Image (cartoon, rainbow, N blue to C red):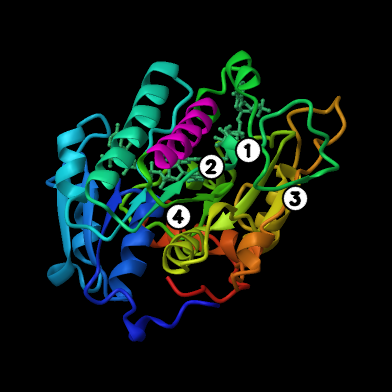
């Protein structure tokens, strides 16, 4: 990959802020940043909550990680955390289809971060967007390549009650507009569904999406497609675009797309002893077609992606290690670095 290895310490002497530091993706960003020598100011809503305790166990955390209390709508809290930083990784966001809980914090929280970053004169802000800000357009054929020029259709998101996708789209659009106005150097990373080992103590929604097929709670699979990517690759992509001066614009960070039927087949091959569903919940309609996402921009920067089978394997092994999922598996893969 294009980045130097950890021991080169390219972050030495640099302080960066990571919002929502205790979350699934942000915890990995904090881990990689600390490994590269950065000093990290992480925002969390409650620094004393046990759900953030894993951050203090990360290598380098004792000397170079501090936690700052900040809600996305608390401008002063964000400003205090971002003050004195060279860069910001804005990852915090709600994940809900409840319009009221989603849109205001996602959009105004992002605006707060950009304004605080402008006031602190940071070198770059990296914003974690979502493929939900890209693919939601009923008029785009699934045969065309979906790249960084594509945006979700806001009316369509609204009309289908996809308030998460709506919120992420409006938040990213607002970030671009405000960054231009305030002269902030902004780059966005656009992941699809993120899998892989959890550092935090509990499961989040995207790992729950895999868990339900092993726990016996899903009796059938949905007639739907999603693209997937490993969490370590997503965190790495954030650092890559932060550290590459020529990086600009949006970066789709997607490894491959699977129909849910393909996903359960891989799981059943890797873990044949779990009660994985074999039936689709929709026996009438044809199989949903894949989107053709392009991550060429990141690949051109040297990014190499973890194969989806490995990502699924790492997700399940992590759920077992955390005691969230009982162990009944046949080992076929070696775990990649946790
Ligand atoms: C900040 O914290 C986060 C953030 C995230 C971010 C995730 C992403 O950005 S994912 C990429 C883009 N997002 C979307 O496409 C959003 C739309 N949501 C989904 O597709 C899913 O909810 C999911 C995120 C993939 C999770 O899937 P899962 O819980 O496994 O549910 P499904 O199997 O897809 O569906 C089960 C069942 O419900 C029906 N259904 C799903 N969505 C809707 C809907 N909007 N309206 C009506 N019905 C819906 C679906 O058809 C299924 O029914 P069946 O009868 O067919 O089984 C992640 C985590 C964080 O903490
Ligand atoms: N996981 C996935 O599959 C994907 C995620 N994304 C994006 O990546 C980012 C991180 O997602 P992920 O790590 O999965 O999510 P998590 O739910 O694990 O983490 C989200 C973080 O956001 C914080 N947060 C939520 N609401 C607020 C708020 N109102 N004020 C302050 N902090 C808040 C949470 O803090 P607290 O601990 O205090 O609750 C939490 O730490 C999000 O922007 C999401 O949209 C994009 C594509 C796919």
Determine which residue is flagged by label 1: 134
Determine the main secondary structure of the stretch shown in magenta.
helix
- Foreground disc of the pair 4, 3: 3
Please state which of residues 248 and 299 is positioned toward the viewer in this rendering: 248
Query: Residue 163, position in %: x, y?
Result: 51, 23
Asked whether mark 2 lies closer than 8 Å to ligand 1, one says yes
Tell me if residue 58 comes above or below residue 23 in the rendering. Answer: below
Q: Is residue 15 magenta?
A: no
Which is more foreground, mark 1 or mark 4? 1
Q: Position of residue 16 (x, y in %)?
A: 27, 60
Q: Position of residue 200 (x, y in %)?
A: 32, 54
Real-space CA distance between mark 1 and mark 4, rounded to the nearest whole angstrom? 36 Å
Q: Check whether the beta carbons of the residues at disc 1 and disc 4 lie within 8 A of each other.
A: no
Q: For mark 2, does the 10 Å Cα neighbourhood hold few (<14), some (14 to 19), or many (20 or more) residues?
A: many
Which portion, as a residue range, is magenta?
166-181
Disc 3: which residue: 262
Q: Secondary structure at mark 3?
A: helix
CB-based contact (under 8 Å), mark 1 and mark 2:
yes
Ligand 2: quadrant of the figure = top left
Q: Nearer the viewer, mark 3 or mark 1?
A: 1
From the image, tell me which residue sits under label 4.
Answer: 326
Q: Considering only order in the chain, which callout, 3 or 4, is on the residue closer to the N terminus?
A: 3
Residue at the image position 72 percent from the left and 36 percent from the top? 224
Q: Nearer the viewer, mark 2 or mark 4?
A: 2
Report how far apart the C-alphas of labels 1 and 2 lie in the structure: 7 Å
Judge from the rendering whether residue 290 lies leftward or rightward of residue 179; answer left or right: right
Front one among 141 and 212: 141
Residue drawn at x 79%, y 26% is: 139
């Amino acid at each position: 990959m294009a980045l130097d290895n950890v021991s080169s310490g390219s972050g030495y002497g640099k302080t960066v802020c990571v919002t929502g530091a205790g979350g699934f993706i942000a915890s990995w960003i904090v881990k990689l940043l600390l490994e590269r020598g950065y000093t990290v100011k992480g925002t969390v809503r409650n620094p004393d909550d046990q759900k953030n305790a894993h951050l203090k166990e990360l290598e380098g955390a004792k000397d170079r990680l501090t936690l700052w209390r900040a809600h996305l709508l608390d401008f002063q809290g964000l400003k205090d955390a971002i003050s004195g930083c060279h860069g910001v990784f804005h990852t915090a966001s709600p994940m809900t289809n409840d319009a009221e809980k989603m849109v205001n914090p996602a959009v105004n929280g992002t605006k707060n971060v950009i304004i605080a970053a402008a006031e602190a004169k940071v070198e770059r802000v990296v914003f974690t967007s979502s493929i939900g800000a890209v693919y939601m357009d009923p008029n785009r054929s699934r045969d065309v390549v979906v790249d960084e020029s594509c945006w979700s259709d806001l009316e369509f998101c609204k009309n289908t009650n996809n308030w998460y996708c709506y919120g992420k789209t409006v938040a990213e659009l607002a970030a671009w507009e405000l960054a231009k106005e305030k002269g902030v150097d902004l780059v966005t990373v656009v992941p699809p569904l993120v899998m892989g080992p959890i550092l935090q103590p509990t499961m989040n929604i995207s790992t729950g999406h895999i868990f339900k097929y092993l726990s016996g709670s899903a009796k059938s699979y949905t007639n739907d497609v999603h693209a997937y990517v490993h969490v370590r690759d997503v965190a790495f992509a954030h650092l890559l675009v932060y550290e590459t001066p020529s990086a600009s614009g949006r970066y789709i960070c997607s490894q491959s797309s699977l129909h849910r039927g393909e996903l359960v087949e891989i799981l059943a091959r890797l873990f044949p002893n779990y009660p994985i569903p074999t039936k689709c919940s929709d026996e009438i309609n044809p199989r949903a077609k894949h989107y053709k996402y392009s991550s060429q921009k990141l690949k051109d920067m040297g990014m190499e992606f973890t194969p989806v089978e490995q990502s699924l394997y790492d997700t399940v092994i992590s759920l077992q290690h955390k005691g969230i999922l009982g162990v009944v598996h046949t080992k076929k893969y070696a775990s990649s670095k946790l």
